[in-house]
Image (tube, helix red, strand yellow):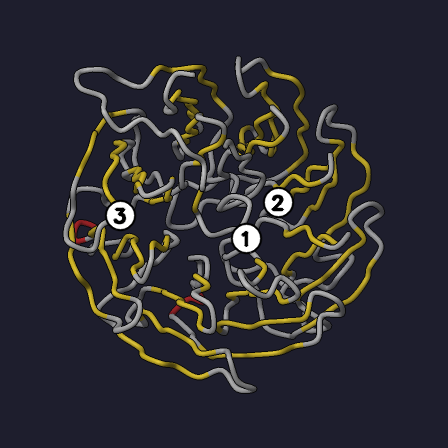
Amino acid sequence: MADDWPGFGGARRDGASTEKGLRLAWGDDEPKLLWKAKVGAGYSSVVEAAGLAYTVGNANGKNTIFCFDANSGEEKWTHSFPCEKSPKYFDGGSRATPAVADGILYLASHEGAFFAFEAKTGKVLWSKDLIEDFNGRRPTWGFSGSPLISDGKVIVDTGSKDGALVAMNAKTGELVWRGGTDEAGYASPMLRANKPTEILVFNRSGLCSFLLADGKPLHRFQHKTRYGINVAQPLDTGNSILISSAYGKGSALVDVSGRIAKAIWETESFSSQMASLVKKDNYAYGIHGQTGARAKYATLCCLDIRKGSTRWEQKGFGLGSVILVGDTLVILSDSGELALAEANPAGYMEKARFQVLGGKDGWTPPSYANGRLYCRSSRGDVVCLEMGLSK
């Protein structure tokens, strides 16, 4: 069974694919390069839906969204709009990943421009400005969330005091509801795994949940960091949500089964600044570390979700990222090295390793769809690799 990867973190925003057939036995072989492209600076992941692949980059004072044929890499269409590179303690470029649903592609820029495109042609169907139209508050490093599409609505975090989380009609852009008052963080709104009528948002203040139908606030758990850097996606484990941040804050498992959200455990021993965790059984896997002088100490970790304790650590990936394909961790280091390893709490068990990109500060997670793995560097090099078993 093959899967599309239509938005940040895949179809469920959990960084996981249930697709079968990822090749694990490589010997002296290297993954086949299906195609490559240069898209401009930034951190937008590549998404794939209905045979087309999309990503966003920045060059010459503009953001450009690219649409490629997922098989051949043929450029199908592009759309550019004014947007500064906006470096701030890093090189800058695009931040947010686009999302596709029902033939429409949605994109928010870090400056606040919001577009709905016809996914096949690039025709602009409607557009908004998150600041001018919704009185949004741009976070320090710009809007970074991938839009959430569900129940005929497209949902974005504007950070507005007048209703931060905004739901628009997915076809027209008309406002449906607004909820919450917290400033925006850098994670993407997502649906609860077992309660798709509820939305999770990891904003500047912490973890919040809302009703999809009308935006009614449900839970709020404070988890503030220095500089407001809450980036990694919440990890839904059922009745509880795992969240993680850096800068001395660490991680928490938050019980949301009752009326008031409360911590089951909190720890400073595991802290992920940017890379979202993935879950296999009762264990989470992710990158422990933060940018700056301490980046060299970053490790890939296995975390026991029930206890909040680290089972094992493995160095060598910097501030990279990890996704889960079946039972396999697909890890991309911040310098472009790709590794496949077992999602196994007993220890780090590597199956293969390849250098697939160059550069530094590669914080963008890979994407896996229909046997293809997409990797992207911060300077804008995209590679599409054949990673599935030959049919």
Q: Name the foreground residue: 332 vs 295.
A: 332
Q: Is residue 63 left or right of residue 307?
A: right
Vertical placement of residue 150 versus 385, above or below: below
Q: Is residue 322 left or right of residue 143?
A: left
Residue 168 shows which numbered tag? none
Disc 3 to disc 2: CB gap under 8 Å: no
- Depth-wise, is mark 3 or mark 1 nearer the camera? 3
Vertical placement of residue 287 versus 340, above or below: below
Q: CA distance from mark 3 to mark 2?
A: 34 Å
What residue is rendered at 57% in x and 58% in y? 190
Give how far across and how far down residue 200 sits, in percent.
56, 65
Give how far across and how far down residue 314 sits, in percent.
15, 49
- Number of numbered discs present? 3
Q: Name the foreground residue: 385 vs 294.
A: 385
Amino acid beneath label 1: Gly
At label 3, counting other C-alpha atoms closer than 10 Å, the crowd grade (few under 14, some 14-19, many 20 or more) is: many
Amino acid beneath label 2: Ser
Of pointers 3 and 1, the one earlier in the residue sequence = 1
Q: CA distance from mark 3 to mark 1?
A: 33 Å
What residue is rendered at 38% in x and 45% in y? 90
Residue 343 shows which numbered tag? 3
Query: Quadrant location of residue 391?
Result: top left
Give how far across and how far down residue 217 sits, in percent.
65, 77
Q: CA distance from mark 2 to mark 1?
A: 8 Å
Instruction: Name the residue carrying label 1.
Output: 142
Q: Name the foreground residue: 282 vs 47.
A: 282
Instruction: Name the residue carrying label 2.
Output: 109
